[in-house]
């Protein structure tokens, strides 16, 4: 056990990096870790729906079975509310913000944006899914959290990360001082430091994009895909195409092995599909801390203004050299948005 460093021990150890902090951010991160363990337990049972009852039905215990993304949303909201460190939550599952108005939280310093269970459509086919979170200091001075507390650029995030519910459950996050990955050890019920100081390869040979949308891609994306497919030994091409259809799973693989994930504008998603506040920004913060890049094809994701909670953006994210090359094709072949 002495060689194992748990998430809780790591957070306390790193708290020294924030001399003025009274531990509120540490508590928030621990609360997210707790909710992640509860969600992981339910995700792992998803395949037993026939026994446990489908969502919206009563199970054998007479309990109402919730859809997993609703369950996950409830768990993270509960964990963030009871901890007292968060005064408002913006969730992919909720049209408006959730104001945490209990005595402890209404003057809390932080707000949290979250996608509680991204890729949940993959649950029924046993594909890895994930939670994405982003933490900001509130901008409102006191009292209940406001929607405006979330209208901050990604550069203002104090922490961000994701949980991947896959062959193992991992929590990967940054507080602006590098990226660290923790793997859940079910035998002790603790996230343990397994991937210290993660860095993503600068150059790589995996591209992740839904080529089914090819005909509606911007010309710059079409040209980049053809670049990836060309034979050229000197630049390790053709690259490999890997697309799981679950953002956190594709992102996590590319973070470790190197690669680029692209969700550009398409016919069905003319502004892109991924949400800026609780998908693109948190992973853009994390990938930059790991030496990678994230843009909308032209502009750095973290510099983009947020004007509505569920605002969408095109997303090019991953290994720095691959993002640079893809964006050079966008500049050359696709008109920059106004
Ligand atoms: P498509 C899941 O719905 C999601 O938001 C991401 O997790 C995933 O990368 C993407 O959409 C898949 O979208 O249009 O390729 O099925």
Image (cartoon, grey):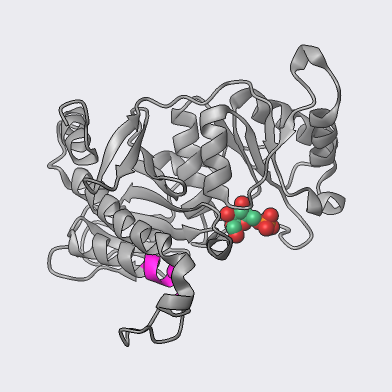
Q: Is residue 180 magenta?
A: no
Side of 16 relative to 165 (left or right): left
Side of 326 relative to 4 (left or right): right
Rendered image quadrant of residue 63: bottom left
Tell me if residue 79 can be seen.
yes
312 or 128, nearer to the observer: 128
Rendered image quadrant of residue 235: top right
Q: Residue at x 37, y 64 (%)?
A: 42
Point out the residue furthest to the top here.
234
Locate the N terminus by quadrant. Answer: top left
Q: Residue at x 35, y 84 (%)?
A: 60
Percent of width and height locating residue 310: 53, 62
Q: Residue at x 73, y 47 (%)?
A: 337
Point out the residue furthest to the front here.
51
28 or 146, nearer to the observer: 28
Side of 280 relative to 40 (left or right): right
Write the start and end of the magenta stretch as one range. Answer: 66-73
Asked if 4 appears above or below 79 in the picture, the reply is above
Percent of width and height locating residue 44: 41, 59
Q: How many marks?
A: 0
Q: Is residue 69 magenta?
A: yes
Asked if 87 appears above or below 66 in the picture, the reply is above
Percent of width and height locating residue 265: 73, 52
The majority secondary structure of the magenta stretch comes to helix
Tell me if residue 158 can be seen.
no
Side of 271 relative to 69 (left or right): right
Which image quadrant shows ligand 1? bottom right
Q: Residue at x 37, y 57 (%)?
A: 40
Asked if 85 appears above or below 183 in the picture, the reply is below
């Amino acid at each position: 056990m002495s060689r194992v460093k748990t998430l809780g021990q790591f957070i306390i150890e790193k708290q020294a990096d924030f001399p003025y902090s009274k531990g509120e951010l540490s508590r928030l991160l621990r609360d997210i870790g707790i909710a992640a363990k509860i969600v992981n337990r339910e995700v792992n049972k998803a395949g037993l729906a026939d026994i446990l009852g489908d969502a919206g039905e009563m199970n054998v215990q007479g309990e109402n079975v919730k859809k997993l993304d609703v369950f996950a949303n409830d768990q993270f909201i509960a964990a963030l509310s009871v901890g007292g460190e968060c005064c408002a939550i913006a969730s992919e599952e909720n049209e408006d913000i959730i104001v945490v108005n209990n005595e402890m939280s209404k003057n809390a310093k932080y707000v949290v944006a979250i996608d509680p269970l991204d890729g949940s459509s993959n649950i029924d086919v046993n594909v890895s899914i994930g939670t994405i979170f982003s933490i900001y200091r509130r901008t409102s001075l006191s009292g209940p959290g406001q929607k405006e507390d979330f209208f901050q650029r990604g550069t203002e995030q104090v922490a961000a990360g994701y949980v991947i519910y896959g062959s193992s459950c991992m929590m990967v996050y940054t507080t602006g001082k590098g990226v660290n990955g923790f793997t859940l050890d079910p035998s002790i019920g603790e996230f343990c430091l397994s991937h210290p100081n993660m860095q993503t390869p600068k150059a790589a040979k995996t591209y992740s994009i839904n080529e089914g949308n090819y005909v509606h891609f911007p010309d710059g994306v079409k040209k980049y895909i053809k670049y990836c497919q060309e034979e050229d030994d000197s630049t390790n091409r053709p690259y490999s195409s890997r697309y799981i259809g679950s953002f956190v799973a594709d992102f996590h693989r590319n973070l470790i092995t190197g690669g680029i994930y692209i969700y550009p504008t398409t016919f069905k998603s003319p502004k892109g599909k991924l949400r800026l506040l609780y998908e693109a920004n948190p992973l853009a913060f994390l990938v930059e801390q790991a030496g990678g890049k994230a843009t909308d094809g032209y502009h750095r994701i973290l510099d983009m203004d947020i004007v509505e909670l569920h605002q969408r953006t095109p997303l090019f994210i991953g290994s720095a050299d691959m993002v640079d090359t893809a964006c050079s094709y966008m500049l050359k072949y696709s008109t920059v948005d106004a």
